[in-house]
Image: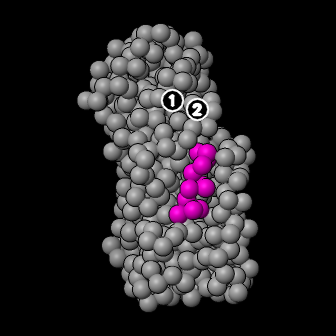
Amino acid sequence: MPTQLGNDDRSTAPRRQGWRHAGTRLACAIALAVAGVCAQAPLPADPALRAAAAHLDSADPIARGEAAMLVAADATPALEARLLALASDPTRAARLRGRIALGLCRTPTAVAALARMAAEGEADDRVVAAYALGLASGPAADSAIAALLAANLHGSWKRNRDLVIALLLGMQRDPSPTATAALRQMLDDDANRDPDVRALLAARVVRHDRSFDDKPLRRLLLRGGAAERAAALAALAEAGEVPLAGALLAAVADAATHDADAHARAAALAALARVHHLPALDLAVRAVRTGTAAEARQGLLCLRRLGGIGMLRAAAPLIAEERDAARAEALLSAFDAPPPAELLARCRALATDGDRPWSLRAAAATLLARAEPEAGALLLRELFRLCRDERLLPKLAAALVAAEREPTPLSKRFPLDASPANDPKRWAALLQADADGALTAVTAALVGSPGAAPPRVALAACRAGRVLTAPTHPATPAVLAEALRID
């Protein structure tokens, strides 16, 4: 499943092969659709991207903006010039998407343009340019990122908040020492008390600033806000190169027991598990028995890491008896072992109970599918078709593809009239999961036909499934959600 940056996490995963015939079946239609663009610039070899490129000059501003995001990573110099023009398009929908496309392009020319766009113009335009500059983080962009952070360091936090948050949300790649120093300077600024900004900064500084060691980290855990503490501890749990011993280890153990925030306690427990701190076993057992959903999930993961599969199997009866929906979902999603019969029976009952929350049903069906792929796939297929919680669709699609021993016709996953134009979020989820036939169907929708639905929705589904999804952080600026929506 792609990250917010696209396909980075799929580079080493085996890809399903059902889409390979798409280029052959659609070659003639695509050639006709992109003939005008071919005369202007070389096009990508990927059939879907070639089809998308035909919409760069669409009369529909959303279609041309979505097409730009799809082709940006493989942009030729001629296409780069088209993206630069689109980033200044007079139509808001195209302009916002065009700026994000420049961030995906990541060329020096695109970065220089984004740095200018983030510093001047309307507030929403500047916010989107800052997000795109974050997407471009790397050797070409880090000096521009550091300059933008420095320019906003002593300004009005009320006025600059969305811009800084957008920049930080875009920065998913490892920053350079120059950009990291700017992040640290902003975190150290006592005038910056916005909890969302500080939490995003803390996560990145803990991961990347090796000088942010024992003393400053303990100070953050003592004086920082709840979101800041939780973010720092979560980063500490993931940063395997950060030493965790002595006074810092004691501070983290104290946070796992006494922090007032449940998410901070769960993150601290994860950090203790990373260094195999055996006293954390007692905390993990307590979390599984009586903790919040976040603590229960992390407690079970800690038991697995420190105690092995046997510890999970010993906890299975307790999980089967859990009646709190949020805790049950958390425990089932973290159960990484062959489930015993009593837990499988509970999963079947929960997955088929229409009165249960979708998230709990999905967790139960996913665990069942690991043990009983055929039965689990039937339940997952039904949940995927009916689920009204769109946030669950990527997880359901990934679980379904993993459970299917043979490629399943798309007609079994959808009502017969479903298409990328009328159910884009499910198609995006199928693309993320590399489901057989999904890319072929979406490519056909991009080519279109007389009387077909406008291509903007299929373009957005393809972009979300293959390139870039909207940030899910609660503080995501509204203009980013607007620019990256897929309906």
Q: In the rendered structure, which segment of residues is drawn in magenta?
A: 434-445
Q: Position of residue 185 (x, y in %)?
A: 53, 66
Identify the residue at image location x=42%, y=78%.
93
Q: Which residue is denoted by mark 1 in the rendering? A: 377
Does residue 327 sit above or below 394 in this rendering? above
Q: Position of residue 108 (x, y in %)?
A: 69, 80
* Quadrant assignment, res 258: top left
Callout 2 touching callout 1 (CB < 8 Å): yes
Circle 1 residues within 10 Å: few <14, some 14–19, many ≥20: many
Q: Which residue is denoted by mark 2 in the rendering? A: 404
Residue 301 is one of the magenta-drawn residues: no
- Between residue 482 and residue 315, name the one nearer to us: 482
- Between residue 4 and residue 464, name the one nearer to us: 464
- Between residue 173 and residue 81, name the one nearer to us: 81
Identify the residue at image location x=44%, y=80%.
60
Give the amino acid at mark 1. Answer: Ala
Does residue 201 sit above or below 56 in this rendering? above
Q: Position of residue 325 (x, y in %)?
A: 31, 28
